Each structure stands twice: as C-alpha cells, then as structure tokens.
Image: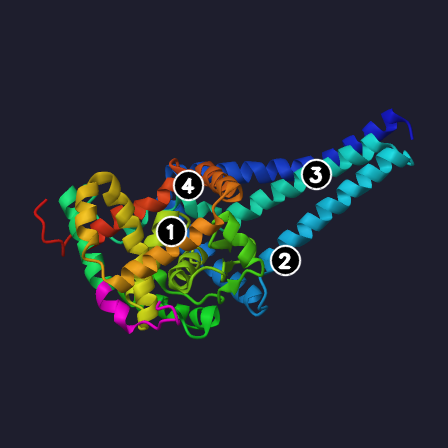
Amino acid sequence: MKYSDMLLQLGGFMKKRSIIFIFILFMIGLTYIVGLSSPTLIETYYSLGFNKWFLQFLSHCTGFIPLSLFEIGIYSLLLCLAYRLLVWLYIAFKRTTPFKRHLTKGLLHIFYFGLTLIFLFYWEWGFNYNRVPLRDTLSLTRTTFTTEELGRLYETLIEKANTLRPFVNEDENGYMTIPGGYKSVFARADLGYLELAKLYPIFYGSYGKPKPILASTYMNYTGITGIYSPFTGEANVNVAILPQALPYTTLHEMAHQRGFASEDECNFIAFLACSVHPDVDFEYSGYLLALAYTNNALSSANPELLKQLNTKLSDKVKADIHYNNTFWKHYSGPIEKASSKVNDTYLKANGISDGERSYGRMVDLLLSYYHDTLDVTP
C-alpha cells in the first residue's frame, strides 16, 4: 500500500469517529460549564437524581463479584499496552507492514479510548465535584474560628478517644485490633451509614459492599489507603493498613461511592458515620481520624497549645498514634512522593485548587459541626 493510500485510509478511520468524539467532548464541556455556573442544577438533577440511582445500580451489579473489577481492569489494561508495544517493536524490526501506519492507528485507538474514559468518568461520577458543598447541605454555616476553639475541639476529641479506647480489642502488643479483620469491617460498614441517614437523609441508599485490593501490601508504598472506581462503582480498600485505620478508610471510600467527590467532605462524612456507628471499633477509628487532622491544624496554629493538650492523651491512644506513624514511615520513599504528586495533580484538574491539602479542610467542617458544643466564646 502506498503511503498516500495509507493516509487516506487513516483519514477515513478518523473521520468516522471524529464526529462522535467531538460530540462527546462538547457534551462534557457543556455539562461541566453548567455545573460550574449552577451547582444547584448538578445537585438536584445529577447528584441526587440520575447519579444517585445509577451508582446504587452499578455498585450492586459489580458487587456480587468478590474481587475488585477495577483492579483487574488495571492489570488487563497494562497487559494490553505491553502487548501493543511488543507488536510495534516487532513490526519496526521485521518491517513486514508499514510501521507508521500501525503506530498512528494504535495511537489513535489509545486517544479515543482515553476520551471514552473521560466521558464515562464525568457522566458516571465526576460531575459530583461540582455539586453543592456539603457545608451548605448540612447547614454548617460558620466558617471562621479562633485558635482557642480549635484547641477546644482537639481537647474534645481527645476526651472522646480516651473514653472509647478501653473498649476496643487489642493484639498481643497492646495495639488496637479487629477480630475478623477487614471482612468484619466490610460486613458492618453499612451500619454507620444507616444510622447517619436517620440524621441526614441525604446519605440514605443501598450500595455494593467494599472490596479488598489484592495488591494492598505493595499499595502501602504509594501511601494510598483506598481508591473509588467511578467506572465500576466499587469502594476499593487497601486492607494491608493497620486495623485502627480500616473502619474510617472504608467509610471514606463508601462516601465517594455515595456521590461525594471532595476529599475533605469524604473525610468528614467518614467521621460522622464512624461516630454514630453502633460498634466501638468504628467509633474509635473515626475519632483517631479527626484527631490526626486536628493535630496537624493546631500544630500550625499554636504548637505550644498542641504540646500542652497532647499530655491529656491516654497512654493507649498515644501508643496507637505512634504505631500508625511508625508504620507509614516504613513505606515512605520516592514511590509515595510520586503517587502523592499524581493525586495532587488529579485533584487540581477536577477543580480542587489546593490539591492534596484539601484533605485537611475536614477540620473546618469539624469546627463548624462542633461549634455549638465548644465552650469558648468566639
């Protein structure tokens, strides 16, 4: 085949698909612009309308399979890309057929596949980044707080964690453990949302169970504790993390599954679901999460006050916190830094201007939620 004929054929190949994908891009862009200009429309017709129904349907369809279809899909995609690369190399060396033709066609396939994933991402879940802020939905109106109020919040969380700690199970080393491991956590996780829905009906719904990630141990090196898959509706959890983190991590990914995109909101939702859960291990796990983020905020605002309040932590709570910090230091390194950079870029690309730092905004929601009980005058 002549090169000119090859170009004509590729041109026809592109033309047939270009109209479809231009339309797809147009629809994504149009809906995204509408979402930015009117979060209320996204909230009413997408997040609480089509998407809420669709996510429940999708998660139940994929939920009957115990393995993570998302994880299997990632492995399959990597194998396909490796196979395609080997084919290109074979053609390049053997020169049995025009290499440029195969390369161009292959790259076009990858490009169109990428556009399809973007389309599915936004229509299946991604527009939730543009929904009404959770603060407004839950009527958490206060937005400014004093350092004294932050300190009082931290003290309140310490008191609650100290109260709960004697009732959790311990391993032979005296650290928190959960009999039954992640399977027990997954089986009971829904109870937190059932209780939370009684207070806030927006969290009501029936969704598929969380799923363990097969490569969890290797995932620790990335610093990632869970991944929600918009394509399969699965809340995927790294089950190689410490037992103390399993409950709140699971409920965090389940918050994504329920149509909440912002990381700070999912952290806060996970805390709420843990705090009303009927089982003490979930409740304690949630307060450890809140303690960690409030500790970081107070460290920047008033290190001396933080040092003073930390003396009120019980020995058992201190031991659990130290154990968690030591655990993650073992896995820190270049892979974790690269993974953090990718996640930061992803969040910023979806309108979260402060990227990974947005996780810490959970403290603002906590302060607003607790402001009526903080005995500090603003």
Res 197 → quadrant = bottom left
- The x, y position of residue 36, in whole percent, is 40, 38
Q: Residue furthest top?
A: 4
The disc labelled 2 sits on which kind of residue?
Answer: Ile
User: SS class of the residue under badge 2?
Assistant: helix
Q: Is residue 351 visible?
A: yes
Question: Pointer 2: what residue?
Answer: 72
Q: In the rendered structure, are the residues bearing label 2 and label 3 in contact, judged by CB atoms less than 8 Å apart? A: no
* Residue plotted at (51% across, 36% down): 29
Magenta stretch bounds:
162-174
Determine whether the residue tagged by mark 1 lies in a helix, strand or loop: helix
Which kind of residue does numbered mark 4 sit on?
Gly
Q: Which mark is residue 44?
A: 1
- Compare marks 2 and 4 and give the one earlier in the sequence: 4
Q: Seen in the image, is 169 located left or right of residue 297?
A: right
Compute the Cα span from label 2 to label 1: 34 Å
Total marks shown come to 4
Q: Are marks 1 and 4 in contact (CB under 8 Å)?
A: no
Residue placed under numbered mark 3 in the picture:
17
